[in-house]
Image (cartoon, rainbow, N blue to C red):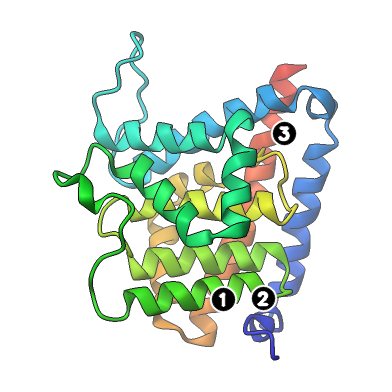
């Protein structure tokens, strides 16, 4: 069977960018602070990722001193971040590897709990022609491909942003799913990277690259994958800053 993502690996610059992202994340995992103290640095990474992801969606990054988060977008992002923290991550990764759609439903339930009026909508894809079929195709693709992990993460992220399968909090879910790919493939096993900071700082290029992916042209897809690899590499630098502060 032909690997559906292999043509993407062969796009100009993609293989090299994926290698650079992988090497950057591998290096930060070897940081002295991350050899045994990675649960602490991963927890900080999860919070930074959640705040940045919320801000991309128009939420606040401010954490109230009393811990009562009123902004529903930030609250959802933080719940997702907790599910991606060290203690809960193993369980969510196991679900992702066994049943990706179930993991996506779980992420949406956490992300959108304060954003929908009807709880029946939580974790349920929109009843729109083509959504279920494309989700099934995405699952089939990611469970069979042998493509480098950064490319898989980019495709999952880009497809969920394009498809908007739930209609609410799809950006939060898409970025969280990208992190799940990074962990489950061994690209970022302890979820130390914080590419969300890069995406927030460059929000307009991020959205433009995602739109280019949605067009489905080779140039558009390559642009998105290269953007994702750059974000992963920058996220490794953010992880290094967290590790440096912990030593």
Among numbered discs 2 and 3, the one appearing first in the sequence: 2
Q: Quadrant of the C terminus?
A: top right
Residue found at x 37% / y 20%: 63
Among numbered discs 3 and 1, the one appearing first in the sequence: 1
- Judged from this view, the residue extending furthest toward the top is 66
Specify whether 118 is left or right of 217: left
Q: Which mark is residue 43?
A: none
User: Is any atom of residue 105 visible in this view?
Assistant: yes
Which is more foreground, mark 3 or mark 1? Answer: 1
Spatial separation of the CA atoms under disc 2 and disc 3: 32 Å
Q: Residues within 10 Å of mark 2 (few under 14, many from 20)?
A: few
Residue denoted by label 1: 140
Q: Position of residue 26 (x, y in %)?
A: 81, 47
Residue denoted by label 3: 240
Q: Secondary structure at mark 3?
A: helix
Q: Position of residue 8 (x, y in %)?
A: 64, 81
Specify whether 105 is left or right of 119: right
């Amino acid at each position: 069977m032909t690997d559906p993502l292999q043509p993407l690996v062969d796009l100009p610059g993609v293989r090299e960018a994926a290698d650079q992202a992988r090497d950057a994340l591998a290096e930060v995992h070897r940081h002295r602070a991350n050899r045994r103290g990675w649960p602490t640095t991963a927890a900080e990474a999860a919070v930074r990722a959640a705040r940045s992801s919320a801000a991309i969606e128009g939420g606040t990054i401010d954490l109230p001193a009393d811990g009562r988060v009123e902004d529903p977008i930030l609250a959802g992002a933080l719940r997702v971040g907790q599910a991606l923290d060290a203690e809960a991550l193993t369980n969510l990764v196991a679900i992702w590897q066994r049943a990706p759609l179930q993991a996506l439903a779980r992420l949406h339930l956490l992300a959108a709990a304060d954003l929908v009026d009807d709880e029946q909508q939580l974790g349920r894809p929109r009843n729109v022609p083509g959504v279920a079929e494309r989700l099934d195709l995405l699952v089939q693709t990611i469970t069979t491909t042998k493509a480098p992990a950064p490319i898989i993460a980019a495709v999952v992220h880009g497809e969920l942003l394009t498809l908007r399968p739930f209609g609410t909090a799809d950006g939060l879910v898409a970025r969280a799913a990208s992190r799940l790919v990074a962990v489950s493939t061994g690209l970022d096993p302890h979820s130390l990277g914080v590419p969300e900071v890069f995406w927030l700082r460059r929000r307009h290029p991020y959205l433009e690259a995602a739109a280019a992916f949605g067009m489905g042209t080779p140039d558009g897809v390559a642009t998105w994958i290269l953007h994702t690899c750059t974000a992963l590499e920058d996220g490794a630098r953010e992880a290094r800053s967290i590790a440096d502060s912990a030593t």
